[in-house]
């Protein structure tokens, strides 16, 4: 209980706040991406005989991550953000240790599922904290700046995993994740105060829950952009579950996974930085909409390249890198747009939106991953379809008014402006 009722912390400066937001979000990326180079070793040591089943190490985490988000936001709207975030980080640390000592593949998947449930607190509560302090374009700017730091995780995590398994058993990856969780818990405890206003606390009862969910689900913009994020999550998760096998089986170059993944992820960091610089001027909608359109077009081009037999490691990395950049431009702004009208129930909104997009995205992405047949064609056909579905969701949410900045809110707290 002392974790939930932790003493107040001093207010961090704006740069430290962005770094702290990025750090808590990085727990998710490290828990996923550091596994990629270790999947064959995990499968071999635990007697997994069907190659595509090694993807379940990623899927188990994502399913737990999605389910837990459904509850965390509602709890935070009642009890606040900080204490629950501290509890989540402690849980993340404990279940990282549990995964490190799991004796069977089934128990490893259970530990990964629980690790995902606790990591969900980092996602939901961190976004809720940002929404407590910002709205509209200002929120999109802060999330984009945080994403620049956050995107170091996809760049560094596979390399970290590769280095660890080069000198130690794969179980040490989970020990490192536990250490990261403990460091973040200490940082939050010492430096992050409660962000929710006491007057925004909402009782947990059937009527209040129904009311809060009704607010989120009755908002056309919230629902539309949540669906768009869901399809985008499905596409990127399909890529993540397949990428290790693509490097190993399609191109026969598993040793290049860390470097290739870093190149592809780096474009996301660049795009997030660009978005943070231009979103206040150009607006969330045109940037996000053009980003989504570009993502879908490049995916379709990739289908043609793969189907005609012209796919090479270079074309794969190049086209996926461009797609990742467009992905970052769209999802950063779509997340802010999904939250824009529901700030007074930010915890519930972040919880519901995150849970739906993650669970559906994890299931859909797992289906895509299981379709892997030694080529990249099934992956990019599925990603193209996901991009088209996202465009339809956005079109409906905006009542056909695409690629304009109509309705963008620019209200912000000047004391927190990040220029």
Image (cartoon, rainbow, N blue to C red):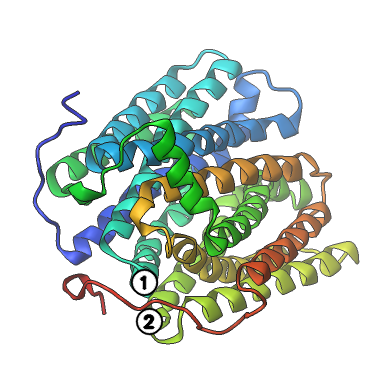
Q: Quick one: SS at disc 2?
A: helix
Q: Alpha-carbon distance for marks 2 and 1? A: 7 Å
| Residue 9 appears left or right of 168 | left
Q: Quick one: SS at disc 1?
A: helix
Q: Which mark is residue 141?
A: 1
Total residue callouts: 2
Please identify the quadrant where the N terminus is shown.
top left
Q: Is residue 150 visible?
A: yes
Residue extending furthest right? Answer: 308
Where does residue 95 sit, x and y in percent of width and height?
Answer: 40, 25
Q: Residues within 10 Å of mark 1 (few under 14, many from 20)?
A: many
Q: Which mark is residue 15?
A: none
Q: Quadrant of residue 190?
A: top left
Q: Which mark is residue 280?
A: 2
The residue nearer to you, when weighing 347 against 170, is 347
Q: Earlier in the sequence, mark 2 or mark 1?
A: 1
Where does residue 40 sit, x and y in percent of width and height?
Answer: 64, 33
Say if 310 sits above or below 193 in the image. below
> Going 36% across and 72% down the picture, which residue do you hit?
141
> Going 16% across and 72% down the picture, which residue do you hit?
415
Q: Residues within 10 Å of mark 2 (few under 14, many from 20)?
A: some
| Residue 186 appears left or right of 290 | left
Where does residue 30 sit, x and y in percent of width and height?
Answer: 44, 44
Say if 71 sits above or below 149 in the image. above
Please identify the quadrant where the C terminus is shown.
bottom left
| Residue 332 appears left or right of 12 | right
The residue nearer to you, when weighing 15 against 134, is 134
Where does residue 8 sit, x and y in percent of width and height?
Answer: 10, 43
> Going 73% across and 74% down the picture, which residue do you hit?
297
């Amino acid at each position: 209980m002392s974790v939930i009722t932790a003493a107040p912390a001093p207010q961090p400066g704006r740069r430290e706040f962005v770094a702290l937001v990025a750090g808590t979000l990085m727990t998710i990326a490290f828990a996923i991406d550091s596994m990629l180079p270790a999947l064959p070793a995990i499968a071999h040591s635990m007697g997994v005989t069907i190659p595509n089943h090694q993807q379940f190490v990623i899927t188990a985490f994502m399913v737990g991550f999605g389910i837990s988000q459904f509850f965390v936001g509602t709890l935070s709207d009642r009890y606040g953000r900080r204490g629950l975030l501290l509890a989540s980080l402690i849980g993340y640390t404990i279940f990282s240790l549990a995964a490190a000592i799991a004796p069977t593949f089934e128990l490893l998947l259970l530990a990964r599922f629980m690790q995902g449930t606790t990591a969900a607190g980092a996602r939901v509560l961190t976004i809720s904290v940002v929404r407590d302090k910002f709205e509209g374009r200002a929120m999109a700017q802060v999330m984009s700046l945080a994403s620049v730091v956050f995107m170091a995780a996809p760049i560094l995590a596979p390399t970290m995993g590769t280095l660890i398994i080069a000198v130690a058993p794969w179980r040490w990856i989970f020990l490192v994740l536990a250490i990261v969780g403990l460091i973040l818990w200490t940082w939050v405890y010492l430096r992050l105060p409660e962000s929710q206003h006491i007057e925004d606390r909402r009782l947990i009862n059937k009527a209040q829950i129904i009311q809060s969910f009704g607010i989120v689900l009755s908002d056309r913009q919230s629902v539309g952009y949540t669906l768009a994020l869901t399809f985008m999550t499905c596409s990127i998760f399909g890529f993540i579950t397949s990428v290790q096998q693509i490097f190993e089986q399609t191109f026969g170059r598993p040793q290049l996974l860390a470097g290739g993944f870093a190149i592809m992820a780096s474009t996301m960091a660049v795009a997030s930085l660009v978005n943070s610089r231009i979103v206040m001027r150009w607006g969330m909608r045109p940037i996000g909409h053009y980003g989504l359109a570009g993502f879908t077009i490049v995916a379709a081009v990739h289908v043609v390249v793969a189907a005609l037999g012209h796919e090479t490691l270079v074309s794969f990395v190049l086209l996926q890198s461009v797609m990742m950049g467009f992905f970052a431009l769209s999802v950063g702004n779509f997340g802010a747009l999904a939250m824009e009208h529901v700030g007074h129930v930010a915890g519930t909104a972040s919880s519901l939106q995150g849970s739906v997009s993650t669970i559906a995205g994890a299931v859909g992405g797992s289906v895509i991953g299981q379709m892997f047949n030694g080529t990249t064609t099934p992956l990019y056909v599925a990603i193209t379809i996901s991009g088209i579905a996202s465009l339809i969701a956005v079109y409906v949410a905006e009542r056909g008014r695409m690629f304009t900045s109509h309705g963008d809110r620019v209200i912000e707290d000047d004391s927190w402006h990040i220029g």
